[in-house]
Amino acid sequence: MMRRVGVVALALLLLLTTADDLVAQDTTLAQGGIYQRPFIAASNRTAIGGYVEANTSWSRTEGISEGPSSELRRFNIFLYSAMGRRLRFTSELEFEHGTEEIKIETALVDFVVSPSLVFRAGVLLPPIGAFNVNHDGPRYEFVERPLVSTEIIPATLSEAGAGIHGRLAPGGRGGGQGGGLTLSYDAYFTNGLDDRVVLNETGRTSLTHGKGESLFAEDQNGSPAFSGRFAARARGLGEFGLSHYRGIYNVWKLEGEEVDDARWLSLTAFDVQTDMGPVALRGEVALATIDVPLDLGEVHGDRQWGFYLDAVMPVWHPRIRALTDPVVNMALRVERVDFNVGEFSSTGARRFDEVSAVSLGASLRPVPETVFRLNYRLEWHRDLVGNPTERTAGIQVGVATYF
């Protein structure tokens, strides 16, 4: 009886959802990052687009420099197609550092029951914080990606899996950009990270090294990871999100026999995007907990954390012929990551292994989809036992644009 009621309820939901509801995207939500791209707006069915990032950097570490260096950091190609009212496909192919790394970043299908219930499957971006799902270079005023979002949260993290997402507007049907309050949720099961989290060449616990191309094909331990994010966006307040990721990262069974303890890792993140007067604020904080084998000792941290906060303020709207509303922004970023939280059990002394950084930026946006960036960055490193800080200072000039 309950099964029959559920089928009828789903059928009614499908019938009551209008075509406009299905197509509409709330471009204010971090959740919709993969659909917040200029090339999609003009698409009737299939569209191709992408973005490119290039930069020149010059830095010194304790007075030593190797001189300036230029690179094509990223060249990403998007492909999008709407196969009828309820099905859409999107993918992203990334060429990083020239052709040093070529990978599929996303390749997924969404089946839209309604804006509040969308089934998703394929190679997707687990919603750990906002940056992993909303990371395109042209959206940021800085050349470097945040340390917490790439070293604690292993962005950009892509995994094969499936799940659901949606948005809700309490007191208003279907949600939308004009509503007072919009809620969004994501929940996915994916292959998860592998044992290179601890078995890697860095000599420390590194979630970034636990991701790999093989994870698109199979789950190495047959234990899917779970990721989920819940966010609220209120008009005049901005968006606030809370997310969690948890999974087993090691091979603990072979041919049905237990060969090791199941070792878990978890990530919890809080992200914010809001305005304080003319200043736009965006940031996230993350905490990672990892079950590390005892024989690896205290060099491999079982807790890691970090944060970043960007502040961006427009300071000038120059008049440039043939451009509608160019803007010059000033930006500040503060960030910190700690790869080994805690104390040495033998001495009680604090463990360090941490990086702090401050970046200042000036940018020109001739159009919203293109940014020319000038950054000055100071970075401080401390090793595991807290030896004197190693300082790096550098200037970066770059451009990022959608096409």
Image: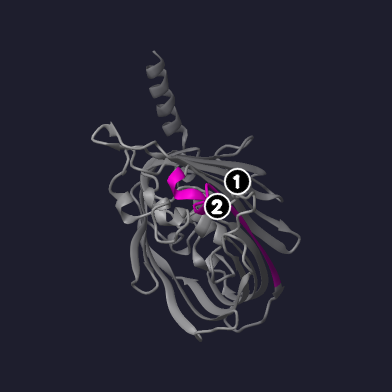
On residue 215, the disc is: none
Which one is earlier in the sequence, the residue at label 1 or at label 2?
2
Q: Nearer the viewer, residue 254 or 236?
A: 254
Residue drawn at the location 52% of the way across and 50% of the way down: 298
On residue 130, the disc is: 2
Cβ atoms at labels 1 and 2 below 8 Å apart? yes
Rendering coords of residue 324 (x, y %): 60, 75
Q: Amino acid at mark 2?
A: Ala
Can you say which quadrant of the picture contains the C terminus?
bottom left
Considering every residue shown, the one lying at the far top of the view is: 1
Residue 264 falls inside the magenta stretch: no
Position of residue 328 relative to residue 182, above or below, is: below
Residue wearing tag 1: 241
Residue 177 lies left or right of residue 75; in this view the side is right
Rendering coords of residue 29 (x, y %): 56, 50
Can you say which quadrant of the picture contains the N terminus?
top left
Which residues are drawn in magenta?
294-314
- Number of other residues with Cα within 10 Å of mark 1, as a class: few under 14, some 14 to 19, many 20 or more: many
Secondary structure at badge 1 equals strand
Considering every residue shown, the one lying at the far left of the view is: 255
The image quarter in which residue 78 lies: bottom left
Residue 376 lies left or right of residue 107; in this view the side is right
Residue drawn at the location 32% of the way across and 40% of the way down: 221
Q: Amino acid at mark 1?
A: Gly
Rendering coords of residue 58 (x, y %): 54, 82
Q: Nearer the viewer, residue 131 or 263?
A: 263
Position of residue 119 relative to residue 152, above or below, is: above
Q: Nearer the viewer, residue 50 or 137?
A: 137
Q: Nearer the viewer, residue 200 or 160?
A: 200
